[in-house]
Image: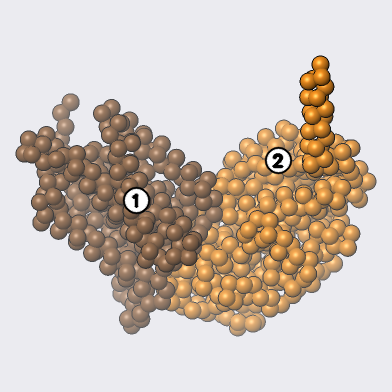
Amino acid sequence: MRLSATRLALGSGLLALIAAASPARADFTAPDLQIAVPAELSGSGASVGVLWRDGVHMAIDDVNAKGGVLGHKLVATDYDTQTNPSVSRAVIQKALDGHPYAVLGPVYSGSVKVDEELTKAAHITEIMGGEAGDLTTLGDAYVFRTGLGQAQTIPPVVEYMAHDLKAKRIAMIWVNDDYGKGGRDAFLADAKKAGLNVVADLSSEVGQVNFQADVLRLRASHPDAVFIYLHEEEAARFLKGARQMGVAVPMVGGTTVIDSQTMKLAGSAANGVVGFSGLATGAPMPAVQNFVQRFQAEFHVHPDHNAIKGYMAVWMVKAATEKMGKPDATGLAAALHGLMIEPASQPGILLPMHVLANGDVDNGGFMVVVKDGQQHIIRIMKPSM
Amino acid sequence: MAALLAQLLLTGLATGAIYALVAIGFSLLWQGSQVVNFAQGDFVTLPAFVMLGVMGYGLPLWVAMPVALLVSLLVLGVLFRRVLVQPMLRHGVMPLVIATMALSIFMENAMKNVASAEAYPFPGLSGGIDLGPLFLDWQSAVTLLSAVLAVLALHLFLSRTRTGRAIQATAQNPAVARLLGINVDRMILITFLINAALVTLAAVLISPAYLVKFNNGEAIGLTAFCAAIIGGFNQVRGAVAGGLLLGVTETFAATFGPDQYRAAVPMVLLIVFVLFRPQGLLGRREERRV
């Protein structure tokens, strides 16, 4: 009997120690809010999807550390889209079967395009990383961007090529998916208005590894400048191939050409490349730099704009929920429309963000040049809010 | 126009030279032990990761290369044969083919788990020389030269040395070779080791442009397989011809054909050869009685 009492005392003490060492679960008296995080965790888009996911997780940890959302703890469940739209659709359906509070992801536009009708039908908000122009023009009230769309990022690029570079003959290379086709169409329309002559129009495939033929065609067209609209890995391969073949004309593109992954993979071949991004890790803002340092310390990789997007997506959910005063999964989208989110009230929103009526966001942007593997801001565009 | 065609030819040959190195491995393994190795593309990726791992300790590429070669000889040569090929071969060619497919899936997932799904940069040569209308970049020049030297060395080894001739005899008829006193098992092992060395060389040459990623082997393996069939699966020189032809055709098709169909070029060429010249460019007809 004495032995049992001793065991009981020891057991109680051990349980007390475990309870003391555990996170303060008791702080969250309200039910958890489930966040589904579908992302490109494998396949050709893994390098961006993983950063998105890590950004989401970092934000969830930050939000929970500050008491969660109106006392509710955020709990993330990850899903791998394998960078495959059909798999993405399947995993989103699986995620919706679990009745999440919100869906954060995926990043690739092609995946978003095929799965957004599922979240729309379920009246669940999908905050994603896609940039293709038509993602927010399909009348889906439940889909939101975390960064600028092509309608916002292409015009500054065209303007830079026409006015800063004084280029006339443009060679363009784009990836043959929803993201690339959207960027190509937007660029062609704006280039025509600006009087630019597209002398080479080269499409490539997702995951393409050999760009030698493309570079040769590009060289043969004798352009003044090159417009690049490829995903990060392909952009790096193209840049390496182009530099290897002695292409020295200015190269300009969207967010991906100045992405940290592209810079890492292309090495010195990325030097001199100019791109426009709504979210640049090189932005000279304390909040952004603090995020970059913390992300590097936690995940041991340099974040890119996708990491920032994932991070801000969680804070968008928090801001909209607090606006409603209570968690309401079906009302979340309505609360987001037209929402003006300031870093002062939501510190995880690194830059002031205006959520537009169609799900686009406006937070200004940065024209960036790559020097020695680092982003250098050459122009800051203020948000038009 | 002539300059562009010459440039395309040069670029296509450099690309094709890498396909040829990998395709030779297909051919050697088939001739040596009736193995169709569908993990051959992943065999190129593994030494690339080994080199990256070694360079991760701050060591230069020239140190990483022999380490990767040793690992390749051990894992892709000796272990591959002992652990997978020998036990499976007695059950026939088809179970072994399926086993190599399984090996490919295993290797890709293992590399992904160890090195993540991200791509990694690999050191290469930059710059080149302007030859008037032609531009010869150093990476392509070294690729072409290395591949030519490797193929030449292999040819001399197989045709001028006693071991090389024994390997050829083993490939032609293992039973008779055994009667002649040739250590058939040893000869087969040597073909596996040669294949391991060739994929290591291919890894060094291809990784600067392709980057290093766990699933790179899918593309290069399939293309090299097509190259081996097109050239003639039962001839090493056929694999070389097939690789070069495929590299040049791909480059021309990507330049003058519709962009969207460029990935289909190896397959289309394969179908054409299977229909109209099943023995391949330089292969010999084989008949089997059942």
Would residue A54 be found to the left or right of residue B31 on screen?
right
**Residue assigned mark 1:** B72
* Residue drawn at the location 11% of the way across and 41% of the way down: B182
Q: Colour of chain A?
A: orange
- Around disc 2, counting alpha carbons within 10 Å, would you say few (fewer than 14), some (14 to 19), or many (20 or more)? some
Task: Give the total of numbered labels.
Answer: 2
Using the image as rendered, state which of residue B125 and residue A198 is in the foreground: B125
| Chain displayed in brown | B
Mark carried by residue A64: none
Residue lying at the far right of the rendered structure? A325
Q: Chain of mark 2?
A: A
Residue holding disc 2: A77
Near-viewer residue (A95 or A89): A95
Which quadrant of the view contains residue A148? bottom right
User: Residue B28, percent across and down?
Assistant: 23, 47
> In which chain is the residue bearing label 1?
B
Secondary structure category for the residue under label 2 = strand
Question: Quadrant location of the C terminus of chain B?
Answer: top left
Q: Position of residue A98 (x, y in %)?
A: 73, 33
Q: Report whether residue B231 is seen.
A: yes
